[in-house]
Image (cartoon, coloured by chain):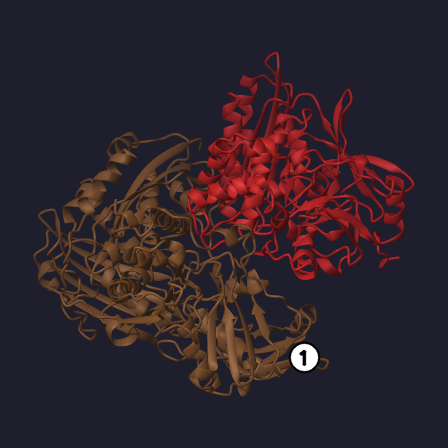
Amino acid sequence: MNPISKPVQKTDHCAKANGSARYVCDYPVSGMLFGRIIRSEIAKGVVKRVILPDMPQGYFYVDKNDVTGINEVHMIQDDTPVFTDNVEFIGEPVGMLAGPDEDEVNKFLSAVEIDYIELDPVLDVNKSDNVFFDFNINKGDVDDAFKSADKVIEGTYKTGLQEHIYLETNGIIAEYRDGKLFVHGSLQCPYYVQRAVVRATGLRPDDVIVRQDITGGGFGGKEDFPSTLACQVAVAALKAGGKPVRVVFDREEDIIATSKRHPSICTYKVAVKNGRVTGMAVDVLIDAGAYTTMSMVVLQRATIGACGVYDIANIKIHGHARKTNTVPNGAFRGFGGPQVFFAVEMMMTHVAKELGVDSVDFKLAHFAKQGDLTSTSGIYHFPVPLLAMAEDVLRESDYYRKMNEFKNQSGRFRRGIGFSAIFHGAGFTGNGERDIIKATARLKKHTDGKVEILTGNTDMGQGLNTTFIKIVAQELSLPYEQVINELPDTSRVPDSGPTVASRSIMVVGELLRRAAAELKNCWIDGEEQVIEKHYEHPDFLIPFNADTFTGDAYPTYSWAVNAVEVEVDTLTGFITVPGAWGSFDVGTPIDENIVIGQMEGGFVQSLGWGIMENCAPGNGRIGNKLMCDYIIPTSLDIPNMKIMLYVEQYPEGPFGAKGAGEMPHVGGAPAIIEAIQNALGVNIYKLPFMPEDVMDALRKENLPYG
Amino acid sequence: MDNVNQFPKVKFTLNNNKITYSGNPSIRLLDYLRSDLELTGTKCGCKEGECGACAVLVDGRLINSCLIAMGSLCDADVVTIEGYGKTERFAALDKAYASVSAVQCGFCIPGMMMASESILSSNPDPTEEEIRIGMSGNICRCTGYNSIVKAIGIAAKDSDQFLKDELSPRAPQTKTHPKSLNDVLKLRKNTSLIPYSGGTDLMVSGKCSEARYLFINNMEELHRISEDEKFIRFGTACTFTEVIESPLSPAILKEACEQIAAPAIRNAGTIGGNIANGSAKADSALIFMVTDSMLRLANADRERIIPIKEFYLGAGKTALEPDELIVEVLMPKLGIDNYYYKKVGARNALAISRTSFAGILDVSDGIIKNCATAFGAVIDVIIRRSDIDNMFIDKSIDEAKALKDKYLSAYDEAIQPRRGRVGIQYRKDVCMNLLKDFLVSNGI
């Protein structure tokens, strides 16, 4: 084990454990104004008039007319309005009320009426002809593969919305004083927020300061969304006469109004010759919701991953993201990967079943190897450890024995075990790091010998504060206490890119390591020294062409193999999970505990997405909008997971580390759905797969006591 | 009278400090802690008792501070993370959490710490299963729970602090309720105050701070569990936890109460509230229905005892008169040992029944003396069809077998689920499956 992997006490442990950590909702509220957002009640229409109740002095209303800059939230494209009068989804912000008493603001909010001209919304992505993004991948000759195939097998796979349920809801405070706008809150990407607020307010970049508060979970849900909320709160703050304005969502508002995981429909056509998959034609459709937000990059990742971890010579993938009049879908751990890996993993089991062969053996025989071409005709430059990882998982889960034992069950409780193998491309897709992000990281050595880390990257619970410190301390041979890493503040830190895409350790961590190495060489006691490092694109990469989708989409990959066992109660359809296993390769773990914690947490989110989490969308509305009905796993729904770390070092990452955060959310769902499929002896094409679905499947056979 | 503040002053202890509270008795303890006292270690994640981020200890028991009104805290001993964080016991637990890096985003952690303390103070050497049950009302989205379960186990093993350092008395202190039952019934008669027992339903409503409550949670008379020749008698302010812990409670009732929500809800929620809110999803009410229990209802002038079945009139509608309180549940003692119970929720804890079933078959000398079934969460009220069940009474098992088809087809007709969140066909299938399994498991 690399010495850096040895766990240490996390830097944020004490304050979080004893309750003294200050989240955005914990700031003293004296002198603060409370804002509540006025949201559309219809899915599409034009706002004719907003009728406000009479409000005493000190209470005020803001809408698009108060936006002093451009009424757009800067993201990748800038189509999301700060406030709208042209409604595109239920829950869209039309305006905001703010004032000194929160209860009063709530009362005024419930008295607001909106006059609309209602228009017909498009709620079904299949019926949407508004294509936001459209990508194509071609490798080999898929037509020829189908022509010469022994067999062609098809399948269509659907996945549903998923809500993040970070325990801390979204919240932002903004204050305008002395010509400076100070914005802080629960967020993943301070510079995303800063640039968005600059654009919406028209203020100079130097006059907009964004700081991250301690953040109670993100999982992607605080990547794009806080930019929108921050612009709204900022607009209100400019009108607040110097008082801070605070908006902290309650749970219902957070579930209704914030981004979700894109629902998907993936259609596969698979050519098989001599027992081997020779071609795959895939259509990947994701539901973007009303605005583009992160859909372009989510779709890129989904399109690239649609053929899974398999070496398939001829492929053709069409990915498209379409608009519907629903809440915009954005970033969520895995970022398009979970959807397509669910689909391709199920497809492979269905092909194996059709061929009458064991699905695990079938998958193993198709695993890509080092040197093989990726879907975008790039190369897997580094060893692909899937076979060794699969061996560990199959052994630990006692897979083959269980598969055998679980055949032909007929009693009340039926067991099944499922298997999945996945990758997650580490870092931004394609040339994002080189062309768009251009990360800078800085170390500042103070005169007392303490070294301060200056980056824009955030800890939202995943442990980045600790792992950054470990990297720098290890390289400088300093005790951890000598290295400081404060919450990022855009007036102090360079833009080292967002904390997304499982990039922070691999990319920014490496910049810090290099900065530390340089500092070590030029260290002068008693002097202040600053070392800055800029991103350098690895030179081994085959350049990625974003038009043709060819070249290396990712420098390297993190890998995972999962197995999940289920027990299905055929009387009630209830699914329990007696066992879950995973082998994960994230390169060198910078801290073993932290990495295992990431793997366990992501794994459970993936299992929840598979069998439990259901937004119950209907008519453009989120049906399950409270934590009592949008349910996620409790401690009694999850077994003691067995996590194994496999280390395939990445030479360009710090100490051999690569991306970690997102990958565990990719493989759990296909493994658990395959387990249910094996328990019931049916083919499953969708998730979430819930007790009702189990009973529907069973209704087709004789019930045990029927 | 409506706006009369029932408790002009609420005296209680908070983190070893004496507090006299004279504000609105209907506001949540959570809001008082966070807004009035700026004790922000206690977090707000949902305000409906579904996440546990706001958990505190009240009289040594885990309670969701979002679901408890200030007026209910007379004489209570409240400990929040700010108080607990200063104890040796916390230090030992904290060390264990740190050793496995069980703290990620941290937002659930203060509540998780209180849950951990609650587990270890009642059980210094818990099994993994007991730990998982103890923390099942505390949602964590980051860790997947493994590391937290491990931390609590380590704290239990590695530290004898938990044995030495007494945090707060486990047994509830004797409470002096300012009013007798009679006085409360008079208030009930003369005001339109809403009886507040555990608060776990009432406080979910966003408008709870505007409600006016009649606090009956501390009334000693309503907490008694006793027995006479025919009945076990439960005071209606008994919490689910009190029912579970009582040696007098029959197994069928314990089993149902153990599956209600999660510890913090069971520590506050009461059987009286469960019955009074008139829900067909009420898990303890299902048991009182299947056992044909009686309710003792009282007003200031008289009392009456009615079969619980007559209490339910429709969704949220009951036979309780505006001046009455449910004082006692009289549960028959005999003939309820051979039971079948299944709650079907969407998950293993913090679950609202999607369907529930209870059955009792009392067989003596080969003859069925009593057959009773009840179905929850199917229609507006719990289904209890003694007219159908009576088909089996005074029959042998073999005779019952011969009647089985007729019995099942009668239920097939009787069970017509109302439209709801959970599919009609699903609930129907589950009801019939469980009913059949109940029969099969009894050899019918």
State the residue at coordinates (60%, 31%): B164
Question: Which chain is drawn using brown?
Answer: A
Camera-side residue: A3 or A24? A3
Residue B1 appears left or right of A558: right
Residue B143: image x %, image y %?
43, 48
Badge 1: chain ID: A
Q: Nearer the viewer, residue B34 or A157?
A: B34
* Residue farthest top in this picture: B365
* Residue drawn at x 90%, y 51% as measured from the top left: B190
**Name of the residue lying farthest toward the right:** B301
- Identify the chain drawn in red: B
Residue A116 at least partly seen: no
Quarter of the image for residue A439 reads: bottom left
Please name the amino acid that badge 1 sits on.
Tyr
How many neighbours does mark 1 have within 10 angstroms: few (below 14), some (14-19), or many (20 or more)?
some
Can residue A309 be seen from the camera position used here?
yes
The quarter in which the C terminus of chain A is drawn is top left
Quadrant where the N terminus of chain A lies?
Answer: top left
Rendered view: A537 above or below B357: below
- In percent of the image, x 44 and y 74: which residue is there? A193
* Residue A223 x %, y %: 41, 67
User: Which residue has dot 1 on it?
Assistant: A59
- Secondary element under disc 1, as helix, strand or loop, is loop
In the image, residue A288 sits, relative to residue B230, either above or below, namely below
- x then y, percent, for residue A600: 38, 47
* Residue that sits furthest to the front in the current view: A526
